[in-house]
Image (spheres, rainbow, N blue to C red):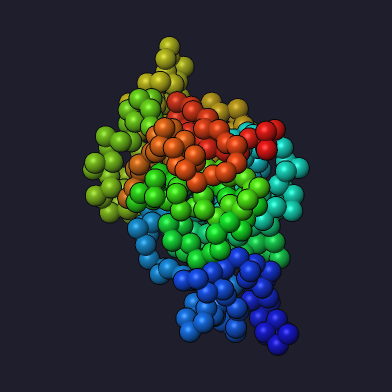
Amino acid sequence: MGIKKKNKKIAMIDNFVKYFEYNGIPASPHHDFLVFGQHQIPIRNGIPRFTPDVSYSTGNFSQLREKHATLQLDSHNLTTDRYDTILKRTNWPKSFFKDKTILECGCGAGPDTEILLFLEARVLAVDISSIDKARINLGQNKNLCLVQADITDLPLKKKSFDVVFCHRVLQHTPSPEHTLRHILQFVKVGGAVFVHSYAKTFFQMCNWKYALRLLTTRMNPEKLYNVIKYYAPTAFKITNVISKLPKGDSINHFLFPFRNHRRVDKFKKLSDAQIIEYGIHDTFDALSPRYDNPISAKAMCRIGEEILGIPFEVAKGRAITLLRTILERY
């Protein structure tokens, strides 16, 4: 009772404390720490910190969160991009999410987290570093627990979550197959999973970014960002012209190093300046991450069969691959 009066942020962690386990020991919150026997994990800004503030994502993903902290949030860009994408890719009805406890593996600045909370889920959202931007974007919420931790070594109880959710993250971990095996262990019996990866297809792997990444991953992230920002307005105009040519979208996909979403229906109401900002963000996101290793659909299926005891499908596309629970058979 005393702790709740002193620190409301710790009180919110109380709502999720049963899900924590570190080296086989359950957690208890005490002042500014999560305590696991003799081991203490600091809590700052209401966030348990299992990893350092600096990681392999520092300089690329942290750069995007600093410069474009709210860009991808539906509540700020006034689109339904994330909402529509989550419902389409999971292939689950929006009613399914209500009152589910979701483990979100890799939350970034919180654009998907915002939607999961809007759908009335309870979310334990994890990211390896720079998670304070998510706290600013999402605020304090009794249905949210933010955790700074490595999704390849989660300090959580296995088989304890209604849903394991991993979107746009898997390919950016050092070993996607290891990561997938690890996170699937946390869905409980009778639960559901949704995992996204870039596809390991000719269409995806022959995108311009994989040739350029041989250079750009060795560049200083700030310098790379400034180069992209400098050429973005011109690249926007050029890719607009190319997209009107026969096979223009394919030319842009394979050859021109700029992500232009001007022709995307759900972004039609955005200004050119907003589309250029998206282009800077997404081009830097393509060229800067230390890891970008799409997992094959075959490997995804094999790992799902090894670990999951629930019906699932692996949906194969030219650019993305999805592992998801099939609700109608479930």
Q: Residue furthest bottom?
A: 2
Residue 16 in picture, x, y percent from top left = 65, 67
**Foreground pick, 94 / 232:** 94
Residue sitting at x 35%, y 38%: 231
Residue situated in front as seen by the camera: 144 or 283: 144
Residue 312 percent across, percent down from the top left? 57, 36
Residue 287 place in picture, x, y as percent? 34, 43
The number of discs equals 0
Occupied quadrant, residue 211? top left
Q: Is residue 191 above or below residue 211?
A: below
Residue located at (32% from left, 45% from top): 227
Q: Residue furthest top?
A: 246
> In the rendered image, which quarter contains the C terminus?
top right
Q: Is residue 150 left or right of residue 141?
A: left
| Left or right: residue 112 compared with residue 243 | right
x%, y% of residue 310? 60, 41
Residue at image position (54%, 80%) is 35
In the rendered view, does 253 fall on the left or right side of 43? left
- Is residue 242 visible from the viewing direction of this image? no
Residue at image coords 67%, 56%? 101
Query: Is residue 100 something one can see in this rendering?
Result: yes
Say left or right for 69 vs 153: right
Q: Is residue 265 above or below residue 9?
A: above
Compare residues 310 and 112 and report the one nearer the observer: 310
**Where's the N terminus, which quadrant?**
bottom right
